[in-house]
Amino acid sequence: MKKVHNFFAGPCVLPQQAVDKAIEALKDFKGTGVPVISISHRSKEWVQVMDECRALWKELLNIPDTHEVVFMGGGASLQFLCVAMNFLEKKAGYLETGVWAKKALKEAKGIGEAYAVASSADTTFNYIPKGYEIPTDLDYFHITTNNTIYGTQIKEDLDCPVPLIADMSSDIMSRPRDVSKYALIYGGAQKNVGPAGVAFAIIRKDALGKVSRYIPTMLNYQTHIDGGSMFNTPPVFSIYVMYETLKWLKEIGGVEAIYKTNRQKADMLYAEIDRNALFTGTAAKEDRSDMNVCFVMAPGYEALQDEFLEFAKGQGMLGIKGHRSVGGFRASIYNACPVESVQALVKCMQDFESMKK
């Protein structure tokens, strides 16, 4: 079988070790003789996985005791609503840096007063806004740390005068973060920490209980803290793959080690985009994402877009077509994307340039 290189934006490449362990668990979960998708979530074998998975989260991200980790269904899209239900009492501010930030803001507006403090919509979200002031009368300020469609990323932990909430769906565990600066970090798992089907939330416990409204049981973060993420039946298979993915991350040196690898991959690919006459990057250089590298054909070469896509596919490059809303190309180089795949994409771009110049 021809070697393929997976650059899909999510669901995306997972560590082969985690995939192999998941296949084993589908046949026999921890020697029970039962597939992991058939095991009781109340069994001691499963409870052990939940406890160890939660502990891995806390260890890998240095999560302080002030915070708790929960696993939920519904993906980050349901979290948009959970955020507003649990934290919005009077007014909330959002940093509008892309489609997902806009969708999060939309849900908040359905609950109460919420608005964009700053936005990069004026240039199709190709940069991270700067120089704005965060009002001190907000219940919270919401950011999206990485923008998969446009290839921009907030790389520092903001000093925020109000509770800071972050959607880290597509860059969680990819770089060190100071979790203590956040009232809430949430996201879908299907980029860096597992498959689709489970969302994570890292919640500062004393930030809850500040709203006067009734919060529906399943949308209430306190429900999931109190229930150990098992108030209802959890998505066992998705959590199991997450568990094996985090074990892999720990074995290779943790977040610090993968951050160095991620920087190496991103630097390599951006260097080729900047060198190659046929391509040009779309995001402001200072805001370029380490996770989603977006680029287009350079002026004068636009007609070659479809030809390059076909050429790249023939070389085993999968998932590099840009999001339908922006076009061009996007290479998602999450944690489990090997350096060799990025090297192969760089060579593919160089070979195409040699053919056309």
Image (tube, grey):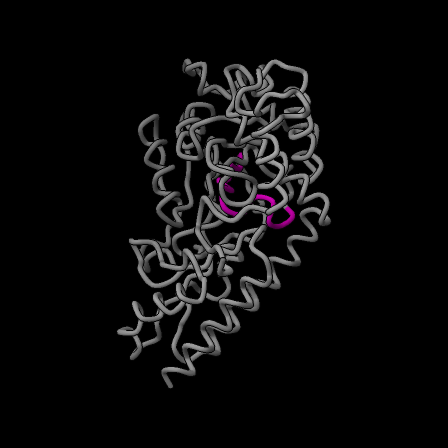
Residue drawn where x is 29% and y is 53% of the image: 325
Relative vertical location of residue 82 with respect to residue 323 in this rendering, above or below:
above
Q: Quadrant of the C terminus?
A: bottom left
On the image, the x and y values in percent for residue 129 come to 43, 55
What's the magenta region? 163-176
Q: Is residue 300 left or right of residue 200?
A: left
Task: Judge whether residue 76 can be spotted in this image.
Answer: yes
Residue drawn where x is 61% and y is 34% of the image: 24
Q: Using the rendered view, name the quadrant where residue 77 is placed.
A: top left
Furthest toward the bottom, the residue is 357
On the image, the x and y values in percent for residue 350 come to 47, 77
Task: Give the number of callouts.
Answer: 0
Task: Judge whether residue 130 can be spotted in this image.
Answer: no
In the rendered image, residue 169 lying in the magenta stretch gets the answer yes
Residue drawn where x is 41% and y is 13% of the image: 214
Magenta-drawn stretch, dominant element (helix, strand or loop):
loop
Closer to us: 44 or 82: 44
On the image, the x and y values in percent for residue 232 come to 50, 15
Residue drawn where x is 57% and y is 15% of the image: 40
